[in-house]
Amino acid sequence: QVQLVESGGGLVQAGGSLRLSCAASGRTFSITAMGWFRQAPGKERAFVAAISWSGSNTYYADSVKGRFTISRDNAKNTVYLQMNSLKPEDTAVYYCAARPKFPPISTMASGYDYWGQGTQVTVSS
């Protein structure tokens, strides 16, 4: 099993920045990639960004390209999502997820086996 704990959500004005963190523990050796997803009220969970466990490959949803950056700290088993130039439409609960399969990168929620509890991000206009 892999446990994921997210932190860093909050309330920010449009144009502001937030950094989300996701700390992984347990059988982290089985992880091939980590992803961030978000879910707004009344909408399906949507892919935001993913990074291979080695950190060599990243992938972003078109809606966040150029504004969000995913990264990882190998020593801390932690993945980050730096969110800049935030917009009200970025408001959602953000979830961290871990994938123990190949190929590493997946944009599908069904491709991830482990999930964090979610952290709320609210962007005011």
Image (tube, rainbow, N blue to C red):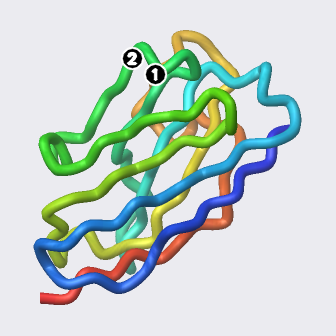
Give the quarter of the image for residue 13.
Answer: bottom left
| Residue at the spot 46% in from the left edge and 22% down from the top edge | 105
Callout 1: SS: loop
Could you tell me how far apart the alpha carbons at marks 2 and 1 are, in whole angstroms? Answer: 8 Å
Query: Pointer 2: what residue?
Result: 57
Left or right: 121 in relation to 120: left
**Helix, strand, or loop for circle 2?**
loop
Residue 28, image x, y percentages: 78, 29
Q: Residue at coordinates 30% horizontally, 42% vertically from top-left?
A: 69
Direction front: furthest residue? 75
Dot placed on the residue nearer the N-terminal end, 2 or 1: 2
Circle 1 Cα neighbour tier, 10 Å, few/some/many (<14 / 14–19 / ≥20): many
Percent across and percent down for residue 59 are 31, 28
The answer to whether residue 120 is above or below residue 75 is below
Q: Quadrant of the C terminus?
A: bottom left
Pick the residue in front: 125 or 93.
Answer: 125
Residue 96 spot, x, y in % from top left? 56, 51
Residue type, mark 2 in image:
Asn
Looking at the image, residue 42 lies above or below residue 76: below
Q: Nearer the viewer, residue 89 or 18?
A: 18
In the shown orientation, is residue 79 left or right of residue 105? right
Residue tagged 1: 105
Badge 2, how many Cα within 10 Å: few under 14, some, many 20+?
few
Q: Amino acid at mark 1?
A: Ile
State the image quarter where residue 118 is shown. Answer: bottom right
- Identified at 46% across, 73% down, the residue is 9
